[in-house]
Amino acid sequence: MVKSRRWMLLVAVAGGTAMAAALAAQQPGRVATPVKDPVIARGEYLAHIAGCNDCHTPLKMGPKGPEPDMTRMLSGHPENMVMPPAPALAPDAPWNWAGAATSTAFAGPWGISYSRNLTPDKETGLGNWTEEQFVRALRTGRHQGNPNGRMILPPMPWPSVSQMTDEDLHAVWTFLRAVPAVRNDAPQSIPAPPPPASAKH
């Protein structure tokens, strides 16, 4: 008898919960919260604490000052923002690097860096990359992980990011594949020319 009552109570609670959910869904202004894939959620968390948005999401001016433009989330340096020549700063000076107002372009002793488009756009982002290429790039600091490819210049902290586990990098990759694709052909970074032969001695 006790078991029967418990069973009836469980059925009633479950039924009431389902009915409440159905009624809530029918109410105007109530939006059901989608259940996020745990791997995507993990990747989003890692991307946030690794500071991916800090350089790959352009800043815009808001009511309280610069703020991330989330309509262009992780799309890199805006292609229509042509930067003037970088300021001449001595490598050994107290101030020796400069950043764009969008926080997507940087100049220093290493050259000029433009943050890349990390969205899954096939023409301008990571849409044609494989996960293996993405992981190799972050492990080696080379574009698409190609040993002869372009170096990933500062301030991209790939030496730190490379310490993520394979599972973490898989989660970040899965998250980046799930963000909205934004077509934005960010400029290529420009390494500083090698020092003159006389300066090497």
Image (tube, rainbow, N blue to C red):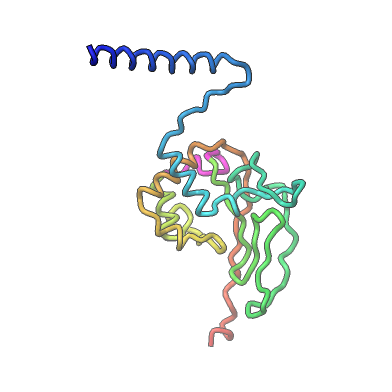
Please tell me which residue is depicted at 50% across the width and 40% down the height of the picture.
127
Q: Residue furthest front?
A: 2
Q: Nearer the viewer, residue 64 or 48?
A: 64
- Over which residues does the magenta segment extend? 120-130
Q: Nearer the viewer, residue 111 or 25?
A: 25
**Dominant secondary-structure state across the stretch colored magenta:** loop
Please tell me which residue is depicted at 59% across the width and 80% down the height of the picture.
196
Residue 119 inside the magenta-drawn segment: no
Q: Residue furthest bottom?
A: 201
Counting from the top left corner in percent of width and height, residue 183 is at 61, 39
Counting from the top left corner in percent of width and height, residue 81 is at 72, 50
Please tell me which residue is depicted at 28% across the width and 13% down the height of the picture.
5
Looking at the picture, does residue 198 appear above or below residue 83? below
Counting from the top left corner in percent of width and height, residue 35 is at 46, 29
Q: Quadrant of the N terminus?
A: top left
Counting from the top left corner in percent of width and height, residue 191 is at 58, 65
Residue 36 falls left or right of residue 118? left
Please tell me which residue is depicted at 65% across the width and 39% down the height of the picture.
71
Q: Nearer the viewer, residue 189 or 37?
A: 37
Q: Residue furthest right?
A: 63
Instruction: Report the label total.
Output: 0
